[in-house]
Amino acid sequence: MNFQERKKKILAALDKAESLSVFELAEILVASPATIRRDLGDIAEEGLLLRTHGGAMKMENPVLTGFLEKSGVNNPVKERIAERAASYVQDGDIIFLDCGSTVFQMCRYLKKKSIRVITNSLPILSELVDTPSIQINLIGGELNKARKAVHGDKAVQHIHGYHAHKAFIGVDGLSAENGLTAHSEHESTITTAFIRNAGETMLLCDASKIGKDSYVKFAELSAIHTLITDSAAEPKADALRQQGLRVEIV
């Protein structure tokens, strides 16, 4: 059986069961777990299913589907960064979550925690809305359909009405010379509001963003308490550490 045939059977099985483990799929397809894991990774990259710990689940929410297809959300590097970030969240915390794809990856690791989430992200809302232990405050404002997120002046005003213990944010560019930069003013104003209203800000950023500057400069490195990034960033990390930034490599 080739990959396309296995892919069709995997998607059909998930359509019926909604979620299955690697071993359940291996039994259904009469294939090795290693083959199934590889297939699930490839199919997830196409945005046709959502990888879970030990298996996969059906991709049924159209809000999530477009977001996941564009963001490559199943990237293993992003998963490691998100898992480490989620380990800093404690029961009782109030947290800001922005609309970045790495921040979204935190959702699977937050579901067993009793917390309050304030977010402008529709995919995060969709992923956490049925989790009983999580209370959600969805930021109001103008919907950016491409980003599946709420932006604008009203959204910023909404954020200023709250205080969070921690903010988890992404960035388009990060450098020792110019701090945090973004592609657009819409996203930078939301992120700035999160930073100003959080007791602690954690930046989730893979190595590809480090050492690069984008269009809008919106925050100094001193605004960030911790950068969580991957091992490929190690050669660039010393310059950030010399500026006083705590860098955690996963």
Image: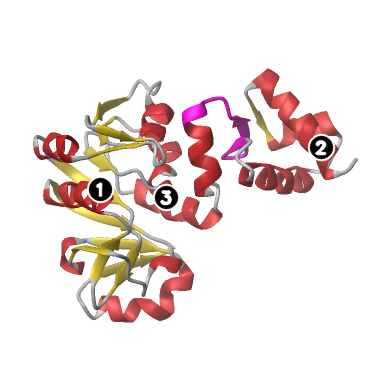
Task: In this rendered view, identify the residue nearer to me: 219 or 250.
Answer: 219
The verdict on residue 59 being magenta is yes
Residue corresponding to mark 3: 102
Residue corresponding to mark 2: 6
Give the foreground label among 3 and 1: 1
Which callout, 3 or 1, points at the residue further toward the start of the chain?
A: 3
Q: Secondary structure at mark 3?
A: helix
Kindly identify the amino acid type of the residue bearing the numbered disc 3. Thr
Taking the spot 69% from the left edge, 18% from the top edge, the residue there is: 16
Q: Residue 219: which quarter of the image?
A: bottom left
The quadrant of the image that shows the C terminus is: bottom left
Which callout, 2 or 3, points at the residue further toward the start of the chain?
A: 2
Q: List x then y, in percent, for residue 211.
A: 36, 75
Q: Is residue 221 visible?
A: yes
**Distance Cα–Cα, label 2 vs label 3:** 29 Å
The quadrant of the image that shows the N terminus is: top right
Mark carried by residue 186: 1
Label 1 Cα crowd, 10 Å radius (few <14 / some 14-19 / many 20+): some
Q: Secondary structure at mark 1?
A: helix
Task: In this rendered view, identify the residue nearer to me: 176 or 128.
Answer: 176
Q: Residue 106: which quarter of the image?
A: top left
In the image: residue 15, left or right of residue 158: right
Kindly identify the amino acid type of the residue bearing the numbered disc 2. Arg
- Contact, CB < 8 Å: mark 1 with mark 2? no
